[in-house]
Image (tube, grey):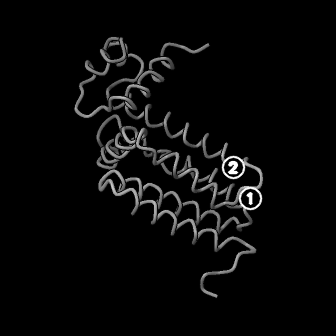
Amino acid sequence: MVDAKERLLAAAVDYVAEHGIGTKSLRQIAAGLGTSHRMLIYHFGSKQGLLVEIIRTVEARQRAVLADLAHEPGESAGDMARRFWRRISDPALWPNVRLFFEVYGQALQGRPGTTHLLDDVVHAWLDPIIALGMAQGLSEQDAQAAARLGLAVTRGLLLDLLTTGDRAAADAAMERYITGYEAQLPGRASPLS
């Protein structure tokens, strides 16, 4: 059974995806969700607490998509990465991506109510990406380095895409990264040989 907090959080994720948050107050967000600001404070502590939980939920959904993609039989690592990039760079998700970068910046500055986002903003992604790299034949050490690099490249290109709107350039850069990643996999010719 889904409790009230989970229902509110699911509605808030959908609300952000459709309307964004921008400069909306907690009262405006609550009105958009059909609840009171007091109920949001009760469940999430503050507007920042709500935003952090929205980000965590969206990121968990994205990790689930990544896990599902990893189970496609016969698909190359590059094709899986391309499908994941298309999914997470979909313009329909841009309000959530903007929110991520906004709150991430606040957390880095130490803004109260946001700093606990930093607890798992990187590490929650590393284990599943490392596991994928090792399944593709990388050593644990190489998979760890590739996971950090892949996460950084993906987030950097998402920021680039949001900032410039230059889809072709962001896609070309991601393709360059994916091609380089594939070349380092065991059994593939090195681009330097």
Q: Residue 2: x and y, percent?
A: 57, 15
What residue is at 57 percent from the left and 56 percent from the top?
A: 82
What residue is at 45 percent from the left and 60 percent from the top?
A: 171
CA–CA distance in space, label 2 to label 1: 10 Å
Visible in this render: residue 51? Answer: yes
**Image height check: is 19 above or below 98?**
above
Instruction: Report whether 66 appears left or right of 95.
Output: right
Mark 1 is on which residue type?
Answer: Ala
Look at the numbered disc 1 and give the secondary structure of its residue.
helix
For residue 70, the mark is 2
Q: Residue 182: x and y, percent?
A: 64, 69
Look at the numbered disc 2 and give the secondary structure of its residue.
loop
What residue is at 58 percent from the left and 60 percent from the top?
A: 147
Mark 2 is on which residue type?
Answer: Ala
Q: Residue 136: x and y, percent?
A: 72, 62
**Image height check: is 121 above or below 148?**
above
- The answer to which image quadrant residue 37 occupies is top left
For residue 113, the mark is none
Q: Nearer the viewer, residue 144 or 57?
A: 57
Instruction: Of the two numbered discs 2 and 1 on the same chain, state the one appearing first in sequence.
Output: 2
Q: Nearer the viewer, residue 133 or 158?
A: 158
Q: Mark 2 packing: few (<14 Cα in 10 Å), some, or many (20+)? A: some
Instruction: Choose mark 2 or mark 1, whichever is in front.
Output: 2
- Residue at numbered disc 1: 135
**Image height check: is 151 above or below 30?**
below
Q: Mark 1 packing: few (<14 Cα in 10 Å), some, or many (20+)? A: some
Q: Quadrant of the C terminus?
A: bottom right
Disc 2 to disc 1: CB gap under 8 Å: yes
Q: Quadrant of the N terminus?
A: top right
Visible in this render: residue 156? Answer: no
